[in-house]
Image: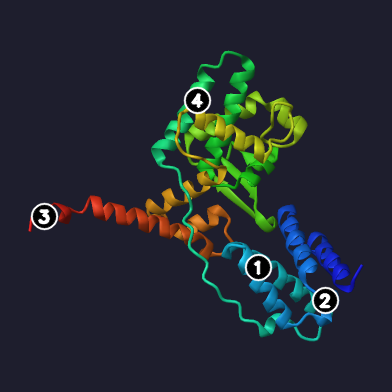
């Protein structure tokens, strides 16, 4: 192994075992750093100059969108901070580089609330009219999954990782383990949602106890992200909804709906598990777009005849 290869491996081990980063973050770091290592001409850390890094950044901009470049550079900057910490270089070459670029604001995609209602109705209809016990149990679980996604705004990875003791239905609280192993607790505020979760837990009690996770698949194993995506596609088709719905859109709809209902953005930040208010502020753009529609269509000035 070269000097650079060896120390990148050391850094990834440091991220995994000391910083305790989650598997998805580690995977992204590994991909980004392997790409850097393969494209940088020097295999020795001390020979990596600001000029080499600037050339690499130019190449990234040629190949990727700003959001991807931003992520890859964040991975790289974190690596060089580690090199600095370990005294593997005298001066961090990133200190001589100013990286500024405008990242386009991509508004979160939300689901219209009547569509959410129609979507949930399709699941409950499937539950009510199920021809077999197997179909009825699956529809019950599906209702519990989608209701919880929409009721809490949690990420799909957080939902699939829920363990049986993370949900306290007597107190109506959910303990969520978010990004960076950060914990947050969120309340179930709706009686119908609490009721369907109770029904699901009672019906799947044996599978939940064997598996240890709250949401299980047909084989009694932990429900996967992909299974939830397939579930959403199934009910989108059943309800004849002409919109591609993803699990994350329920999170966006949760946040935007609360913001439009005048809930303080800091409460929304806490419920979403965002580390910074600036991340949550993306939803203010969606609310402003709603405000514009309201003022264009509802304000009485539009009816003036002047």
Residue 40, given in percent of the width and then of the height, sits at 78, 72
Observer-side mark, 3 or 2, equals 2
Residue 64 versus residue 142 in the image, above or below: below
Describe the element under mark 1 as helix, strand or loop.
helix
Residue 188, given in percent of the width and then of the height, sits at 53, 41
Image mark for residue 60: 1
Image mark for residue 304: 3
Residue 36, given in percent of the width and then of the height, sits at 75, 68
Image mark for residue 180: none
Q: Nearer the viewer, residue 166 or 134?
A: 134
Mark with earlier residue (1, 3):
1
Determine crowd level at label 4: few under 14, some 14-19, many 20+ residues with C-alpha closer than 10 A: some
- The reply to whether callout 2 and callout 4 are in contact (CB within 8 Å) is no
Mark with earlier residue (1, 4):
1
Q: CA distance from mark 1 to mark 3?
A: 53 Å
Quadrant assignment for the C terminus: bottom left
For label 2, the residue is 42
Which residue is farthest top?
131
For label 4, the residue is 124
Describe the element under mark 4 as helix, strand or loop.
helix
Q: CA distance from mark 3 to mark 2?
A: 70 Å
- Residue at image point 52% right, 47% down: 251
Q: Is 48 left or right of 166, judged from the image as shown?
A: right
Observer-side mark, 2 or 4, equals 2
């Amino acid at each position: 192994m070269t000097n650079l290869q060896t120390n990148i491996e050391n850094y990834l081990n440091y991220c995994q075992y000391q910083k305790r980063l989650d598997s998805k973050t580690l995977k992204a770091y590994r991909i980004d750093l392997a790409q850097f290592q393969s494209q940088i001409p020097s295999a020795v850390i001390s020979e990596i100059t600001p000029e080499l890094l600037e050339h690499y950044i130019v190449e990234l901009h040629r190949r990727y969108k700003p959001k991807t470049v931003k992520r890859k550079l964040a991975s790289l900057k974190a690596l060089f901070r580690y090199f600095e910490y370990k005294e593997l270089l005298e001066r961090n070459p990133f200190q001589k580089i100013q990286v500024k670029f405008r990242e386009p604001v991509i508004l979160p995609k939300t689901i219209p609330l009547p569509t959410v209602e129609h979507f949930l109705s399709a699941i409950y209809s499937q539950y009510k009219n199920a021809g077999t016990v197997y179909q009825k149990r699956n529809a019950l679980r599906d209702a519990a999954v989608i209701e919880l996604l929409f009721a809490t705004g949690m990420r799909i990875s957080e939902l699939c990782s829920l363990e049986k003791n993370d949900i306290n239905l007597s107190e109506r609280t959910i303990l969520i383990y978010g990004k960076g192993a950060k914990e947050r607790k969120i309340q179930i505020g709706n009686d119908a949602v609490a009721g369907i979760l109770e029904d699901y837990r009672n019906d799947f009690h044996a599978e939940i106890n064997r598996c240890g996770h709250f949401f299980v698949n047909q084989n009694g194993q932990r429900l996967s992200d992909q299974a939830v995506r397939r579930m959403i596609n199934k009910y989108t088709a059943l309800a004849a909804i002409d919109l591609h719905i993803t699990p994350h859109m329920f999170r966006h709809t949760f946040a935007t709906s609360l913001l439009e209902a005048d809930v303080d953005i800091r409460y929304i930040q806490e419920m979403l598990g965002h580390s910074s208010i600036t991340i949550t502020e993306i939803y203010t753009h969606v609310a402003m777009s709603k405000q514009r529609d309201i003022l264009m269509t509802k304000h009485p000035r539009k009816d003036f005849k002047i």
